[in-house]
Image (cartoon, rainbow, N blue to C red):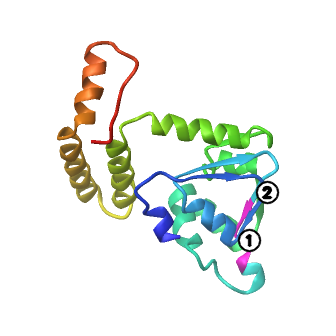
Amino acid sequence: FLKLENMSKPVIAAVNGFALGGGCELAMSCDIRLASEKAKFGQPEVGLGITPGFGGTQRLPRIVGIGRAMELILTAKTISAAEAKEIGLVNEVYAPEELMDKALELANAICANAQIAVQESKRCIRKGMQTDIYTGSAFEAEAFGVCCGTEDKDEGMGAFLEKRKEKHFKGK
């Protein structure tokens, strides 16, 4: 799951059923999580006599806070998609028949932006959350410098200055 989490491209989870144990941990390794109204989430491992084994004890507190993570992991409680949204485990909840269309809509919105900037932003967020604010800010300054040297920056800034909605990013 660390490989998935650290991919350069953003990863969206679209959960339309049970995400318990490893399934929940897989969803948490994604950058953005969407769910259908029928989705369920949980870390039931302690009820089986084991601990979460694929990052649940590390990712869940970073996503929902220590208190909520302790409650979910230590009680082995399963929660609804609505509760998962309420605590920040998922970004949005949709009707089951809308889930994939909404996930693709989100993916297309991300793809419409300058991909070097998207990838650098993801890298900064992921690496920065593992360190102090000073080191994270240094990652950010480095990424800003990388992006300032791209053709996509010229295109994006040009479109802004010309009040143009359409942008023609090339990934360069």
- Circle 1: element type: helix
Observer-nearest residue: 156 or 138? 156
Which residue is tagged 1? 75
Mark 1 → mark 2, Cα distance in angstroms? 21 Å
Q: Which residue is mark 2?
A: 17
Q: Which residues are magenta?
A: 41-45
Q: Nearer the viewer, mark 1 or mark 2?
A: 2
Percent x, y of residue 8: 40, 56
Q: Earlier in the sequence, mark 1 or mark 2?
A: 2
Decide if residue 76 is on the left or right side of residue 152.
right
Q: Is residue 74 left or right of residue 139?
A: right
The answer to whether 124 is drawn above or below residue 94 in the figure is: below
Q: Secondary structure at mark 2?
A: loop
Tell me residue 31's x, y (percent). 51, 53
**Residue at position x 18%, y 45% from top?**
145
**Residue 69: x, y in percent?**
61, 64
Q: Was residue 14 drawn as part of the magenta stretch in this picture?
A: no
